[in-house]
Image (cartoon, rainbow, N blue to C red):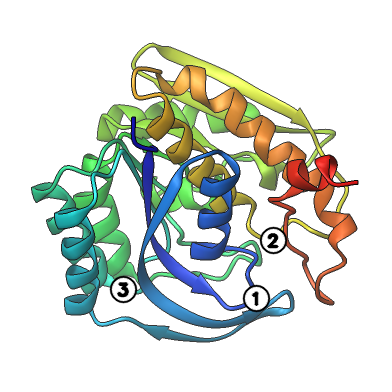
Amino acid sequence: MSVPVALTVAGSDSGGGAGIQADLKTFTALGVYGASVLTALTAQSTRGVFGVHAVPAAFVRSQLEVVLDDIAVHATKVGMLAGAEVARTVAAVLRERTAGPLVLDPVMVATSGDRLLDADAVDVVREELLPLADLVTPNVPEAAVLLGAAPARDVDGCVQQAEELLRRSGTAVLLKGGHLGGAESVDVLATAAGTRLVARPRIATGSAHGTGCTLSSALAALAAREPAAGWDALVEPARDYLQAALSAGTALGVGHGSGPLDHAFALRERTP
């Protein structure tokens, strides 16, 4: 039996903490072969993003088509999209091709609160990509953008917004509650089967860069490995992986800003 394959469609983080780099590290750690399509290059480190160079939409299409023509993809994660044209192109190709369950991480709002996509691109994500996705993983500000509402202020508000996003789109929702603060980090999973909370103790760390990318790519990797499992079964092991990578990240000592997670924590535990 061939190894499961997951595809990430996202931007590059030159510092290695998020984006394509975090996705591929996650795929490998979870035993899945990773393929990638780059939508943008960033001049980025643990100290921030200092420049973005968008990949032309035609070349994004070319990357997607040549990969899907050659490789059987069992799950796909879509992350950063550089603009409306790229988002529309990705939606068009994925509408035509078989690429397994689609996990959409709608990278729209940075942790700082800065908008990362203009209004036209947000509309394309909402209207063209979201209906194609099997699971969408917004954080609190991103869920608000998708709904055209104010951000949720507590877990009850997250439940309401996750269920409303599911109702409008028909797509399962994992609304990440890390922005809410508190002793626990509480996510809300809303699917056709119902709504549940997924909670883990909040980790006090300066190495949390790439958490959103890691969680969405872990879900894609697990979906590639276990195609018969539902999101309700996959969200707990995905959250466990994120928690372990977060806990180990501080010991890496990489950079002088917001450090990365340690995706090789299991390998380091086995190394004398």
Specify the amino acid type for callout 3: Gly
Identify the image quadrant of the N terminus.
top left
Q: Residue at x 56, y 39 (%)?
A: 30
Indicate the position of residue 163 as horizontal and vertical percent values: 41, 26
Find residue 75 and report its image quarter: top left
- How far apart marks 1 and 3 lie (CA) works out to 22 Å
- Mark 3, other Cα within 10 Å: few <14 / some 14–19 / many ≥20: many
| Residue occupied by mark 1 | 15
Specify the amino acid type for callout 1: Gly
| Residue occupied by mark 2 | 209
- Mark 2, other Cα within 10 Å: few <14 / some 14–19 / many ≥20: many
Is residue 154 visible to the viewer in this orientation of the structure? no
Indicate the position of residue 174 as horizontal and vertical percent values: 49, 33
Foreground residue among 173 and 93: 93
For label 3, the SS is loop
| Residue occupied by mark 3 | 83
Q: Is residue 19 left or right of residue 271?
A: left
Residue 77: mark: none
Indicate the position of residue 248 as horizontal and vertical percent values: 83, 48
Specify the amino acid type for callout 2: His
Indicate the position of residue 256 as horizontal and vertical percent values: 84, 77
* Disc nearer the start of the sequence (1/3): 1
Label 1 with label 3: CB-CB less than 8 Å: no
Q: Is residue 78 left or right of residue 84?
A: right
For label 2, the SS is loop
* Disc nearer the start of the sequence (2/1): 1
In the picture shown, does residue 88 fall above or below 191?
below
State which mark lies toward you, 1 or 3: 1
